[in-house]
C-alpha cells in the first residue's frame, strides 16, 4: 500500500524537527510521507499545488485557511493546539501537541479512518491469533500471556494483548490505566454500531504497556459488559484487530469457561496454548473439556491441531505420566516458588527462567522461522 502524504504547518520548529525525526525512525515511516513547514505562506502554497489527497495538520493559530487551500481534495484537516486538553472546533478535530507522539499519530489515523471517504490507513501485517486457555482457573494464563506477548515483541513482532476475562488481573495493566475510561467497552460499542468504525477506533483507544511492550486496551473493566459479549461481538473485535493490519500477533487471555466470547475466540484462533498443572484434577478436567471442544458438531468445534498442551509449574518430573494426557505435551513452564506470594506484579515482570522457558516453546520457534523468512524476502 502506498504511503499517505502528511503535511504539517506550524511555526514551532522544535516540534517540527522532533515530529519529523520520530516519523522517520519509527514504524510510522512506513505509513506517512511527511512534509513540514514553519512558514504559513509556504505551507499553503504547497497545499494548493498538490494533486493528491493528504492529511493536513495545522496549528490552530493559523486558522482560518484561505479558500484556495480547500479547493484541493484534502484527506482530512486536523488542528494542533498548545493546550493540555482541547475540544473539537466545529467539524475540525483538535489534537494537543504535548502528548506522546505515538498517541498523537494514533489519534490522527483514527480520525482519518473514521471520517475520510478515501481508503483507510492500515498496516500490511498478517495477523496470527493465539489464545491462552485452560480447563481450570488459576493455572497462570495471564502471567503466561503477558510474558509470551513480550517474548514475541522482542523477536520484532507487533503484538496486541487482549484480555477477555470477566475479572481480569488489573494489576498487570498500566497503573495510570486504571484512571482511564473503559476503552474495551468503547471499542465494543463501535463494533456493534459499525465494524469500520471499530477498526478506526482501535488506533485511538489502544495504549502501549511501558514495561512489557505490547499494545492493549486500558481502563477500568465492567464484568457485566464482558459477560454480555456475544459470539458475534467477539468475532467482530478480533477481526477488527486482524484487519487493521497493524499486528503480527493477537494474544487472547481467556477465562476457563465456555461462554460465547470464549468459544468464539477459540474458533478464531490459529493456535491455542492450553495450560495445565500436573495434578489429577486438572488432567481429568482437561481431558473432559478437550473432548467436548474437539468433538461437538454444532459448528463450534475446535481443531485439535490448533491446540498445544503446556504443563505449567513443572517441577522437573511428571506425577501423571505423559501417556495419560489427552494430547502430546508441547512444552513445560517451570514452577517458580518465589512467585507463590508477591506484593506487586513488578516482581513478576523481569525476564528470567520463566521467560526463557516461554522462548523455548514450539510456537516461539515458529515465530522465529517466520521472522527469518520475512527478513529473507
Image (cartoon, helix red, strand yellow):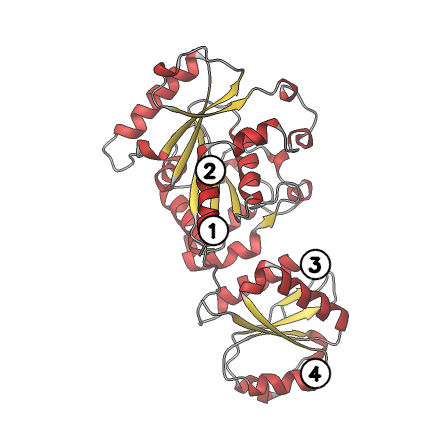
> On residue 189, which mark appears?
1
Q: Nearer the viewer, mark 4 or mark 1?
A: 4
Q: Tell me: residue 66, above or below residue 356.
A: below
The image quadrant where one finds the N terminus is bottom left
Nearest-to-viewer mark from 1 and 2: 2
List the residue tagged with mark 4.
Answer: 40
Identify the mark nearer the N-term, 4 or 1: 4
Q: Of marks 1 and 2, which one's residue comes earlier in the chain?
A: 1
Task: Compute the Cα span from label 4 to label 3.
Answer: 23 Å
For mark 2, what is the residue?
Answer: 365
- Name the residue located 76 percent from the left edge and 69 percent from the top edge: 14
Residue 80 sits in which quadrant?
Answer: bottom right
Q: Secondary structure at mark 1?
A: helix
Q: What residue would you read off at disc 3?
A: 99
CA gap between label 1 and label 2 equals 37 Å
The secondary structure type at the circle numbered 2 is helix
Residue 8 visible at all: yes
Residue 59 placement (x, y as % from top left): 69, 74
Going from N to C along the chain, the mark reached first, 4 or 2, is 4
Q: Is residue 33 left or right of residue 96?
A: left
Ranked by sequence position, the earlier of labels 1 and 3 is 3
Of the image marks 3 and 2, the number of the one nearer the N terminus: 3
- Separation of residues labelled 4 and 1 (CA atoms): 40 Å
Amino acid at each position: 500500500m502506498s504511503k499517505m502524504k502528511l503535511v504539517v504547518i506550524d511555526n514551532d520548529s522544535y516540534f517540527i524537527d522532533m515530529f519529523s525525526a520520530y516519523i522517520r525512525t519509527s514504524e510510522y515511516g512506513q505509513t506517512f510521507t511527511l512534509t513540514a513547514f514553519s512558514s504559513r505562506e509556504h505551507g499553503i502554497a504547497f497545499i494548493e499545488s498538490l494533486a493528491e489527497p493528504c492529511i493536513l495538520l495545522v496549528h490552530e493559530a493559523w486558522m482560518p485557511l484561505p479558500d484556495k487551500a480547500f479547493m484541493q481534495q484534502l484527506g482530512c484537516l486536523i488542528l494542533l493546539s498548545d493546550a493540555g486538553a482541547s475540544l473539537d472546533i466545529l467539524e475540525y478535530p483538535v489534537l494537543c501537541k504535548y502528548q506522546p507522539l505515538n498517541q498523537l499519530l494514533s489519534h490522527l489515523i483514527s480520525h482519518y479512518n473514521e471520517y475520510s471517504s478515501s481508503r483507510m490507513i492500515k498496516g500490511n501485517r498478517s495477523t496470527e491469533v493465539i489464545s491462552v486457555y485452560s480447563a481450570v482457573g488459576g493455572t497462570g494464563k495471564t502471567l503466561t500471556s503477558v510474558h509470551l506477548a513480550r517474548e514475541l515483541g522482542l523477536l520484532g513482532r507487533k503484538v496486541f494483548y487482549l484480555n477477555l476475562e470477566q475479572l481480569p488481573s488489573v494489576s498487570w495493566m498500566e497503573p495510570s490505566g486504571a484512571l482511564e475510561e473503559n476503552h474495551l467497552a468503547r471499542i465494543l460499542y463501535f463494533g456493534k454500531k459499525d465494524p469500520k468504525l471499530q477498526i478506526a477506533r482501535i488506533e485511538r483507544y489502544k495504549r502501549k504497556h511501558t514495561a512489557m511492550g505490547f499494545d492493549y486496551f486500558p481502563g477500568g473493566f465492567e464484568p457485566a459488559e464482558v459477560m454480555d459479549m456475544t459470539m458475534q461481538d467477539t468475532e467482530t473485535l478480533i477481526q477488527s484487530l486482524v484487519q487493521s493490519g497493524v499486528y503480527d500477533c493477537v494474544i487472547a487471555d481467556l477465562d476457563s469457561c465456555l461462554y460465547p466470547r470464549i468459544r468464539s475466540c477459540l474458533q478464531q484462533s490459529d493456535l491455542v496454548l492450553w495450560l495445565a498443572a500436573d495434578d489429577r484434577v486438572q488432567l481429568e478436567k482437561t481431558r473432559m473439556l478437550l473432548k467436548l471442544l474437539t468433538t461437538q458438531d454444532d459448528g463450534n468445534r475446535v481443531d485439535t491441531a490448533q491446540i498445544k498442551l503446556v504443563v505449567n509449574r513443572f517441577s522437573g518430573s511428571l506425577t501423571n505420566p505423559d501417556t495419560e494426557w489427552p494430547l502430546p505435551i508441547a512444552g513445560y513452564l517451570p514452577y517458580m516458588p518465589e512467585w507463590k506470594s508477591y506484593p506487586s506484579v513488578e516482581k513478576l515482570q523481569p525476564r528470567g527462567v520463566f521467560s526463557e522457558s516461554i522462548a523455548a516453546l514450539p510456537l516461539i520457534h515458529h515465530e522465529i522461522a517466520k521472522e527469518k523468512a520475512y527478513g529473507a524476502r
